[in-house]
Image: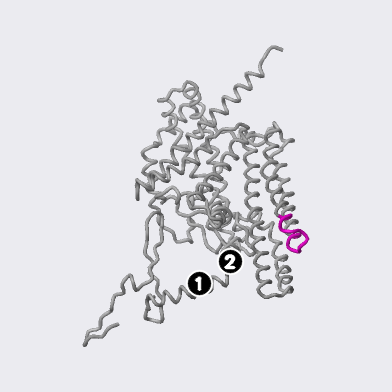
Amino acid sequence: MEEIGPVTRKRRATSHEIGVTLKLVNGRSTVVESAIGHGDSRTFVTKQNVTGLASTASKEKKKRRNVPSDQLSCHRLQESLLSSSSGYSNYRGVLNWCVVMLVLSNARLFLENLLKYGILVDPIQVVALFVKDPYNMPAVCLVIVSNVFVLVAFYTERRLSVGCFSEHFGLLVHSINLSVILCFPVAVVLMVKSVTPVGGAVALGVYTILFLKLYSYKDVNKWCREMCYAKARSLSRSISCKSASATFNGKNNNLYYFVFAPTLCYELNFPRSPKIRKSFLLRRLCEMLFFTQLLVGLTQQWMVPIIQSSMKPLEDMDLSRMVEHLLRLAVPNHLLWLIFFYTFFHSAMNFVAELLQFGDREFYRDWWNSETVPYFWQNWNIPVHKWCLRHFYKPMLKRGVSKWAGQSAVFLASAFFHEYLVSVPLKMLRPWAFLGMMAQLPLAWFVACFLRGNYGNAAVWISLIIGQPFAVLMYVHDYYVLQHREESAGVGPD
C-alpha cells in the first residue's frame, strides 16, 4: 500500500513479484497465483519469499527423501462426480455427444428393427452364455481357486515382515505367484471346452484385477519396509526397526478388505466413510438391476441382428455395405457402452464402496469433456489410471526413461491386457484390440497438433463411436468363420 495525500492506492504486483505456477488442465493452461492470507489482508509471495520457501522446501525434501509418503497414500474421502452430493455441473462434453448422437441415430431405426425381427429378447439365451451345463461350471471354479493366490501373497509378506524371507527370495515368490495368476486361467480356458466365451471373459477379468491388486500389495509393503529400515538406520537403533515391523505386521490384516474394495492401489489405511447410507445403497442397487436388464435387452434386440446381417458383406468384402453396417452398429454399440460405463463405474462400484464404507469414490472424472486423447484415458477409468501412474509410469521415469517412452509403454501394457481379455475367451488370437489401443498414440499426436477445444472433443467422441464397433465386427466375423469351419470339419460320412 502506498499513501499519496488523501488518496490511497493499491500497488499492483507484477508477475515477477508473484510466484506464478502454470498448470495444464485438459489441454489449456491456467495461472494460479500463490498468495498467503493474513486476517483481512493478503500478502503476495515476492522473489525473496519464494527463494526462502524454495530453500526450506529443498531441506525438507532432503529430510523426507527416504519416506515415500505420496506412494503410500493415493486415496482421499470424496464422492463420485455424477452423485448429487458432488456439486458437479459441467456437462459441456455430454452436450457435444448428444449432437453427434442425434446426427448418427434416429428412433426410427429401433422401430424398424422391432417391425422387421419382432421381439428377440430371450433370458434363457443369456443364461446359456455363462453356463452350458449347470453341473459343470469351470469359470466359477476358476474364480474360487483365485483365493489360493491371495493366501500365497499374504503368507509371503508375513514372512518378509518378520525377516524369515530375504528380499530377493520374496521377490522371486511374488513374481512366480503373479505369473501363475496370468497363465493359469489361460490354460484352463483354452483346454476346457465347456468354458463359454462370456464365462471365460469374466474369469479372466477377475484374475486380471487380482494381478493388479497383488502387484500393488507387493510394492506398497516393500516401500513400507524400506521406510522402516531407513528410519532404523537414521536413528542407529535396532529396536526402532523391530517396533516398526510389529506395527507393520498389524497393518497387513486388511488384505481381504483390499481384495474386495473398489480400488487397485493398496494402502495401509484406506479412507473410510462414517456410515452406510441405506437410501444411497438402494438407489445404486435399483440402477444396477434396471440397466443390466436394459443392456441384455438392447444387445439381443438391436445389436445381434445387425451383426448377423453384417457377416455376408464381410465375407464378400463389399466395402460400401461394410461401411453401412459399421455405421448402423455404431449407434447401439456406443449407447450400450455408455450404459455399461454408468452401470459399472457409478452404480456397481459405488454400491460396493458403500457396503465396505470405502471413502474414495473418485472412480471417474469428466472424461466427456476430453479435448485430447490422453485426457480421456486418464479420466474415464481412475482406478486403472492410478495404478499405471503409481506402479508403472513413475517407476520408469525414476529409472531414467523418457516421458514419451513411458507413455508408450503404458499404452503397450494396456493393449496387451485388452487383447488378453478378448482373444483368450474367444479361443483365437487376433490383433484387433491390441492394434486399436496402439492406434491411440498417433491419434493423440494428431488431435494435439491440429485440433483444439470443441474440435478436439468431437474427435475424441468420433473415435469412440466408430472405433469400437469396427473392432466388434472384426472379432465377430473371425469367430463366426472359425466356428463355421469347425462345424464343417465335424460334418462327414458316418
Return the mark for residue 69: 2
Calculate the distance from the C-alpha at mark 1 to the C-alpha at mark 2: 16 Å
Residue 262 horizontal/vertical position (percent) = 60, 54
Question: Magenta residues: mostly which secondary structure?
Answer: helix
Question: The magenta stretch spans which residues?
Answer: 158-170
219 is within the stretch colored magenta = no
| Residue 346 appears in the picture as rendered | no
On screen, residue 202 above or below 21: above
The picture quadrant where one finds residue 274 is bottom right
| Residue 130 appears in the picture as rendered | yes
Say whether residue 320 is left or right of residue 390: left
Residue 423 horizontal/vertical position (percent) = 59, 35
Which residue is most to the top?
493
Q: Residue at 36% across / 38% down in the picture?
A: 103
Q: Residue at 66% across / 16% down in the picture?
A: 491
Residue 63 horizontal/vertical position (percent) = 57, 72
In which quadrant will I find the C terminus? top right
161 is within the stretch colored magenta = yes
Q: Earlier in the sequence, mark 1 or mark 2?
A: 1
